[in-house]
Amino acid sequence: MFPRKAPKGAFRFLCYYFCMQKFLKFPDGFWWGAATSSHQVEGNTHNNWSEWEQSPRRIADLKQEGKNPKDFISGRGADQYHLYEKDFDIAKKLGHTMHRLSIEWSRIEPEEGKFDERELEHYRMVIDALRERGIEPMVTLYHWTEPLWFSKRGGFLHPDAPQAYKRFISRVVDNLKDRVGVWITFNEATTVLAGMAYKRGIWPPQYRSLWKFLQFRRAIVKAHILAYREIKKIYSSLDVSRAPYAAPIMSHNIKAPFVGAVENNTCFKGGRLIRALGIEWAFNRFYNEYLWSRTLPYQDFLGLNYYTLRRLPGSHSAVPETGHLLDQLGWEVYPQGIYERLMALKRFGKPIFITENGLYDSEDHYRGQYIKDHLRWIWQAIQDDTDVRGYLHWSLIDNFEWHHGFQMRFGLVEVDYETLERRIRPSAHEYAKIIQDNGLE
Ligand code: BGC
């Protein structure tokens, strides 16, 4: 599925010293593109998130914080549901060869067991629109949103949830099997979603329970394995994986000892530093690794969503000393971290895809530089024999940034939410030049 030719042995050595010192060339056939998710760009979805955004509790919380609830309701959003051809025209113009998008479960199966044929047809047209433009689709089956019937009965905490998920993905994959070769079962479900929705109580269903957090993660692992087997049954040649989140974790200026952990997002709030370090270590080093090893045989390639360095609670004062840039969310930009993550993944001997990487920069001051800095480290990882096949920037267009609402702009392309006009940002052109050259200085 993912062709790649990298210079090997003596030839590679000569290339490195005589040709590549100035120009960092990526392997032929390297995939370039961007990623999105349904709830964040399609508009007018009806799922657990859209319901939560409008719930009296959420509205009251926002008002109390002095915020306008309107800015936090996904509503029509960027309306990609209707404007996908326009967006894919832009992706084509920018030279993208791959695009990652997600399928909105609540559209396909609005009632338990009842599948909407028109929506299945809609996604066939979306995928065809990509293919007509020479762009390879990568499809995510679960990017955090659920149909109401599913979340109302307990979401992934319900004992039958993995089976219900399997039934949904089976229908979708069967529908698109001749058009889509690369599938992602879950986006950051065991990391970001589990933490925000089940442990920290910020996202729906707003649980603050270590037990539910653990239960949720177990169910996701089970559902992934079921889904993998099901997809392989449909077409054994389809490539299937997950898109997990991983970040180096630091305490003050000391990189935590579990930095080699392959997947993490577990930062425990409060507590003494030593205790926090201990819990972090146990979770990220052992528990996450355990979950990881269970799913490893069921991943044809490895996905990696990499954004930032994370700091243990209480160690933020050290940030300026490192000289790292902070994005508008206060996330600490640390390009070398993507190399560290890739080196941690290398030992599994599977092809790797950067399934997300980006920053919140509404003025587009740093995005171009951010992309280049990360790509230089990815290039370095490839030189060090890591089999990286592609890079998907987050995101193609501005999108609804979950509980942060519309203000946060991650797009290569700016969206005017009043007129729905799209404006290509300068960084998108810088990225297009890299794609055209298949490398950078
Ligand atoms: C998520 C996206 C989100 C992005 C920026 C990623 O972890 O997959 O949905 O928009 O982070 O916050």
Image (spheres, rainbow, N blue to C red):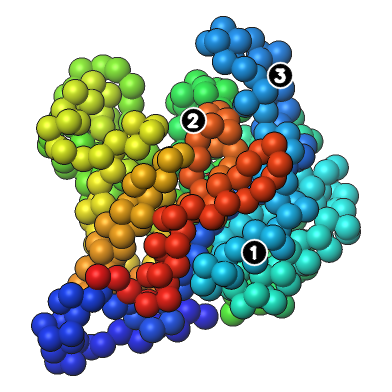
Residue on which disc 2 sits: 196
- Residue 175: x %, y % from top left: 77, 68
407 and 179: which is toward the camera: 407
- Residue 206: x %, y % from top left: 57, 23
Q: Residue at x 52, y 67 (%)?
A: 94
Q: Residues within 10 Å of mark 1 (few under 14, many from 20)?
A: many
- Residue 229: x %, y % from top left: 61, 66
Q: Residues within 10 Å of mark 2 (few under 14, many from 20)?
A: many
Residue on which disc 1 sits: 88
Camera-near label (3 vs 2) is 3
Q: Residue at x 23, y 26 (%)?
A: 316
| The quarter of the displayed image where residue 12 is located | bottom left
Residue on which disc 3 sits: 55
Q: Dot 3 lies on which element? A: loop
Q: Residue 275, relative to residue 377: is it above or below?
A: above
- Residue 315: x %, y % from top left: 20, 25
Cβ at disc 1 under 8 Å from ligand 1: no
Residue type at mark 1 is Phe
Q: Residue at x 35, y 86 (%)?
A: 5
The residues tagged by marks 3 and 2 sit, at their Cα atoms, a distance apart of: 18 Å
Residue type at mark 2 is Met
Task: Let me know if residue 204 appears in the view.
Answer: yes
Cβ at disc 2 under 8 Å from ligand 1: no
Left or right of 15: which side holds 306?
right
Left or right of 434: which side holds 130?
right
137 and 71: which is toward the camera: 71
